[in-house]
Amino acid sequence: MKPVKVLLYTAKIIVLLVLALYCANGKVFCDENPDKNTGIIRKVEIRGNQRISTAAIRSSIRSKEGDLYDPNLVSQDVDAIWSLGFFDNIEVEIEETADGLNLIFLVSERAVIDKIQFSGNKKIKSKKLAKEIEIKEGDTLKYHLLKLDEDKIRDLYKKKCFSRVQVLAESKVINGETVVIFNIEEGPRVRIFDIQFKGNTSYKPRKLLKQMETRKKRFPTLIFPGRFAQDVFESDIAKLKEFYMNNGWLDVDVGWEIAYENDNSEMYITIHVKEGERYYVDTLDINGAAIFTGDELKAALKLKEGGPFFLDAVEKDTYQIRLAYGAQGYLATVVNEKHTFAAEEPKVKVVFDIEERDRYYIDKIKIVGNDKTRDNVIRRQLTFNPGERLNVEKIRDSQRRLTNTGYFDVESGMPAGISFEQGSEPNKKNIIVEVKEGRTGMLRFGGGYGANVGAFGDISYTDRNFDIFDFPKSWNDFLSGNAFRGAGEILTLRFSPGFERTEVLLSLTNPSVFDSPYSAGASAFNYIRWYSLYEQKSSGSRISLGRELVRDTYVRVSPSFELIGIERREDEDDAPQDVLDAEGSHLKTGITFSAEINKTDNIFVPTKGYAIDTSVEFACLDVDIVKYDIRAKKYSTLFEIPKWGKHVVAYGGTFGIVESTSGEDVPIFERYYAGGFGSLRGFEYRGVSPLDQKTDEQVGGDLLVLMNTEYLVPLYKDVVRVALFVDAGKADRSISDFSFERFRVSSGLGLRLNVPFLGQSAISIDYGIPIMREEGDETQGFSFNFGGGSSF
């Protein structure tokens, strides 16, 4: 027999023996019962649950009795039970039976929190801590939530200047109840008492402190508590280093040390600065420029040959070059900057490589997002048109103009965005103007108090995006705000009763008639004003026609008619002759020529730019006068602190003069007075003026000069700001009496609140102290202006 056949024969015998052994033990196909132990689930059990019902657990699993056992599905069932959030542990057991297997889920329920206690807290009450944490009595015990609540308590203490606080949560079973205990070691209340700098030879400590958020304790402690936060302080160190590098000290190193005194409650921080050498620009080259000369581009850059190497100017100057090209339509121009350092000297060679691309033109302008505002209302604010070259400066200016209309949602952060898409030809771009509709109409029931007008009520409706011809199609259309909207007209309805002034006003203005640069408006008014010497009643109407000469520059002509009634107050028996002369009714018709320039970045909360308003009024009939007024104000941002806001200086003045054209004295109700909110704070409203020689009563003057300066410090962005102010000026008899001898000066502190639900209204509180005053002046420390009340 051959060896191969022997091997095959032997293998067959072995296989037959193995099959015989399996059949003998009943483990293979020859078993008489084919269903036995084939993986069929005969029963599903839930064990270990006490509070959670079996039905609730069963509803979350997919494995059912009679199904074939699937380990992957069972794993998913375990995840589903775990996701219920009631169990600390879940195990699976399988019991073999005669006809299949039993699937058993063993669960261990989480404890229910019966009580929450705080231990070691002395400075913060347990009630306040309980409101701060996430877990509550009756919740299931989740250890990851305990860790999160530890952090919340720790953060609360750190806000109270307990920077060394330790918090540890534990759970115990006491008398059969599950009790969660937060163990707190408060430590001392640590406040920063001083921050010193060492090694800083180029900048004073005050300049460096402006780069930091960390502040030492000082008055008022509510605003400056001297809180130390490690993450904020480390960020401040990085900002200091960045500040030095951006100003040319590229090798600067900043370190610090912290010392404690008075039982570790007083923190003293010392910041060590190693400035190193300052780097300067050795050479500055611009390559690849054909449209501009190198000198033209260099003039717009912050970096200069021989000047300091400002690190942040690298990116800014690159952007400035791109902006110059973008203003000429070369939107895709590529600008790359490279700088190399000298081997032995602190000098830098700077090179800007420019790759000029094609000029782009505007193909189409598309408006999106304007559900209520008409396209033409938006387009008339744009300073660019189809067919002209694309100019990024005009695009930025158009965004500013759209924001200043007040039509769109400023609080969204992007009320008007502008982007590009490919046009019909390779060198053309479509401009997409995307706006987000805002609340332009405001119905207000309220009131306020103004130092110049006293307490007053206010029932008013103002809409800056009104459309008088957009009639509602249904009652629901009117209630939902979809009617009378979208044309950009300005409607004002107001009824303001008060103790010192009552006003009724109806006004409608179209700022762009038929989408032209011309504007038109009409108003009717009636008001009563109670002054110290007399009562004035005025009613009349005014029509205004205007034109926008150039962008942000407007001229107007406004004819008006007014009936003025003057009545001496009953308690003024010895009234000045000027009051007696003015008693009775006066018809006044006149025409006012005015001009306005507004170049501010935001008309509601300006931080830079300027505004000028001037007018000349000619009046006749019973009131023969010529009155000239000019008001100007400039805003400058000094610097901006992240998360706080911009520090702004605002300064300006008012000059007014009125003369009679009849040869008689100017009526007392047309004269100028100074004092009060918006004038000379620290003095009463109309508390500064020439005096009557016989009665020593204030009778007003023909000349007004005011100068105001404010430094606005943000406490919370633009919502809460502190104002430091200095006011100067006077009201005098005539221009011939003008001098600085009788100038009044005051200074003080104020608070500005821009509350969102008041719309564009604000709350102003000022406390002024007269520094220079004259005999007969009436002073007043506090001046208030609540609810946006106007003054007359």
Image (cartoon, helix red, strand yellow):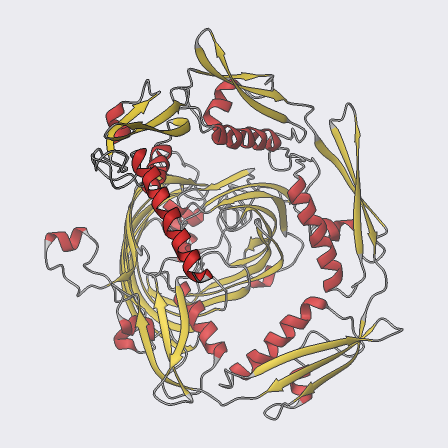
Of the 4 image quadrants, the one containing the N terminus is: bottom left
Task: Please tell me in which quadrant of the rendered image residue 41 appears.
Answer: top left
In the rendered image, residue 16, in percent from the top left (x then y), is placed at: 34, 46
- Above or below: residue 427 compared with residue 218: below
In the rendered image, residue 609, in percent from the top left (x then y), is placed at: 54, 66
- Above or below: residue 376 compared with residue 628: below
The answer to whether any part of residue 397 appears in the image is yes
Extreme residue in the bottom direction: 290
The answer to whether any part of residue 552 appears in the image is no
Residue at the image position 40 percent from the left and 29 percent from the top? 91
Task: Please tell me in which quadrant of the rendered image residue 768 appears.
Answer: top right
Which residue is nearer to you in this view: 108 or 68? Answer: 68
Residue at the image position 42 percent from the left and 19 percent from the top? 113
Which residue is nearer to you in this view: 390 or 63? Answer: 63
In the rendered image, residue 106, in percent from the top left (x then y), is placed at: 36, 25
Extreme residue in the front direction: 1
